[in-house]
Image (cartoon, grey):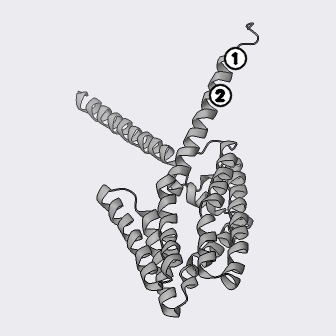
Amino acid sequence: MTSLDKPTTEETAADTSADDARAVTEAALFEAFGGVRGMVETVLPGLLFVSIYTVNKNLHMSALAALGVALVMVVVRLARRDTVKHAFSGVFGVGFGVVFAMMTGNAKDFYLPGMLYTLGLALAYIVTAMAGVPLIGLMLGPVFKENLSWRTRNPGRKKAYTKASWAWGLILLAKCAILFPLYWWADTTQLGWVLVALKIPPFLLAVYLTWVFLAKAPPPIDVFAEMEAEERAEEERKAAAAGEGEGAQAGRHRRP
């Protein structure tokens, strides 16, 4: 390799910076969407429900088993002092499903609240993207410590968040286009197994596309660091002003 072929210091620094940005993006997405454990907590209650119902067609046993395992996952997280938002969302989703199914006596209604939530979330992603305040940006801004700075100060990230929100919205709409016809035409076990099968792949696709868009976007503006720097600068100005005041007062005392 000649000297011309060797990477310059600037190129190496740029590569390192890009790698760091991708690593930060991966970590933030992993935190925001719950990682592997979050996916397990999302899938397990529905999987348990459809498994039990497939065997014995007992709505009450299936529903209570699903709710019980969701509660156990919350208790485990609380005992380990982990973040419980994903487990709690699972409990609420399962709880609504149990209530619906018990009220109507139709086992398929166990899945209806989650399906309606998915449809509403898909529309929210699309509407907010069209309005210029993409939902993904609202969700991930605090995770990246940029809050809403991307809206006015970082157009490259706003564009990436808009693309990601469109991706999430369209992927979830495609999922709904499969599930809602099955809700009307298929039986409970068919709907349940298809729903379980569609839990993870669309989610992983949406997360991957979000990572692709954000990895190519400009780095986030750390507004928390900016606020801390402003506070330190203000304290230094106050300290300097106080020192000048004390010096002037001491000078007056030294005059004859």
> Which of disc 2 and disc 1 is earlier in sequence?
1
| Location of residue 124 (image quadrant) | bottom right
Residue shown at 57% from the left, 55% from the top: 140
Of 21 and 94, nearer the camera is: 94
Q: Is residue 242 in view?
A: yes
Q: Secondary structure at mark 2?
A: helix
47 left or right, relative to 156: left
139 left or right, relative to 157: left
Residue 7 marker: 1
**Residue under label 2:** 15
Q: Is residue 144 in view?
A: no
Local crowd size for mark 1, using a 10 Å CA cut-off: few (<14), some (14–19), many (≥20): few
Residue 9 against residue 78 in the figure, above or below: above
Residue 20 against residue 123 in the figure, above or below: above
The percent coordinates of residue 169 (x first, y second) are 70, 65
> Residues at badges 1 and 2 in contact (C-beta under 8 Å)?
yes
